[in-house]
Image (cartoon, helix red, strand yellow):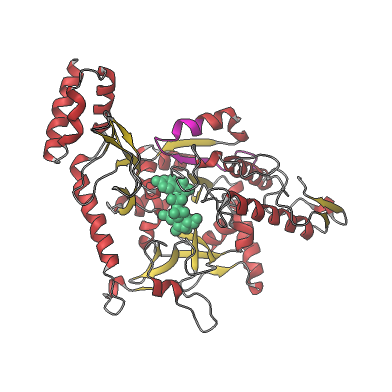
Amino acid sequence: MTDEYNTLLASITKRCEAANQLHILTHLSDDTISQSDKLSFLQSINEIPLEKLASYLQGALDEEEKLKNFDPTNVAKEDMVEPFIGGLSTKDTSQQDTLKESNSIGMKAVSNGEVAALLLAGGQGTRLGYNGPKGMYDIGLPSKSTLFQYMSERIKKLGELSGKGAKAVPFYIMTSPLNHKATTEYFEKSDNFGIDVHFFPQGTLPALTSPDGKMILETQTSLAVAPDGNGGIYPALVKHGILNDMKKRGIKYIHAFGVDNALVKPADPTFVGYCIKKDADCGNKVLWKTSPDEKVGVVATKGGNPCIVEYSDISKEMSERRDVNGRLVFGAGNICNHFYTLDFMENVIVPNLGNMYHVARKKIPYYDEEKKETVKPTSNNGIKLESFIFDVFPLSKNMAVLDVARSEEFAPVKNPPGTSSDSPDTARMLFSNVAKEWVKKAGATLVGDLESDLCEISPMTSYNGEGLEKYKGKEIECPFSI
Ligand code: UD2
């Protein structure tokens, strides 16, 4: 045993003992396990905030309990959740001038090199059932582009449209330790799609049993760990010096978005420009929910401050409440598109980061001491602790909300192929519909298989329907690839 090993073992044993987690060291006395496996196991434990796990778990369980016992007839003022009032709808015909102005403000910011795109790609994509980074998923359009490719090419095209060139908008990608290598290798192989890309991994936390909060061994020398939720973005931005890097480059505005929307418009100049125009510190793009049980969070206010109530946390009564016109009152659906000024991120969010985690009950693979192998349970046996990216929104003093057209901006890829909603199939159809609409708007007539879900306009041809003038008066046969 080396000195390094012995020193680490002594310190970790002490910390595990104090944290009531000694069981994870059980196999270190097994001579059949290699020294290097044991050392890397100890090094991985050393990264875990052992002393804080119990309080993280307690906080998350308390919050879960509070939600369970929520009594709408007896709510303290600071917990009062109300619909968010304000914001602008892109469908409001009287506001088209404001939208045009917003777009040119956003374009100017892009051409000044002031806008960064920030992708949340650290999730595990368990629901999709795809064994790899979700961004590498191909939804089956003719180009066989992956989600990463669509986003990168849109960023490239936007830079070109702004006049500053392909690298106008730096693309920061948050991975997780579980998918970092696969993601970076993919981009490297694709020459970063010709844009300026930067990667940084978010943190992980160990899965815990409930309620006693024991860490779970997945193998003899590894723990079951999971990314710490998309709210892990803030500590990760600091840890990896990303905010400083942005500052050095002159970035002032950040557009953060999820990896699983095939129609996402990275660094969307209209959204960014609208937030700049409103002098907002933080902003959110929404679309109106189609039904009470649609799995999107909703923008609201809590105790007068902006917030998002996650779909897993909203009460049935709130989600079903409608106004006199039958419109859902809590309907401003979050599509994981957030705007921040760098100033708000650095000077308000970062100094005020708390340890706020939510409980996600999951099936955690564990090492079965009798079978001597890893077993995948069939029911939930543990908890993952996750923070949400929007948990910091109550810090905003001026939140801008832009309500956009669902058909143009939201093609979620959450569920496996063959599922009737939020699947690669529904996303492909939505993507094709946008392509058809754009050529029709450009003055073309569609012929052929009008129902085809294989119609595609490459982001290198058009970011948002522009640049299709040459199709005016032409017939276009569906399916098509432009
Ligand atoms: C997210 C929103 C939800 C709704 C919906 C719309 C959150 C917490 N919830 O729910 O309100 O708007 O999207 O599509 O944002 N991710 C990470 N690291 C993690 C976990 C997730 O980077 O540890 C990324 C993930 O890769 C994805 C995004 O965050 O790009 C959203 O994550 P999700 O798929 O877990 O969220 P979902 O669909 O439950």
**Quadrant location, the C terminus:** top right
Residue 62 coordinates in the image, percent (x, y)? 23, 60
Q: Nearer the viewer, residue 71 or 220?
A: 220
Rendered view: 317 above or below 347 = below
Residue 175 coordinates in the image, percent (x, y)? 44, 39
Residue in the picture at 55% in, 32% down: 187
Residue in the picture at 49% in, 37% down: 131
Residue in the picture at 38% in, 37% down: 240
475 is within the stretch colored magenta: no
Residue furthest out toward the top: 2
Q: Is residue 16 visible?
A: yes
Q: Nearer the viewer, residue 271 or 477?
A: 477
Rendered view: 2 above or below 176 = above
Residue 408 as seen in the image, left or right of residue 343? right
Chain part drawn in magenta: 164-184
Quadrant for residue 146, please give it: top right
Q: Nearer the viewer, residue 16 or 234?
A: 16
Number of numbered tags placed on the structure image: 0
Q: Is residue 279 visible?
A: no
Residue 355 as seen in the image, left or right of residue 84? left
**Quadrant location, the N terminus:** top left
Residue 437 coordinates in the image, percent (x, y)? 73, 59
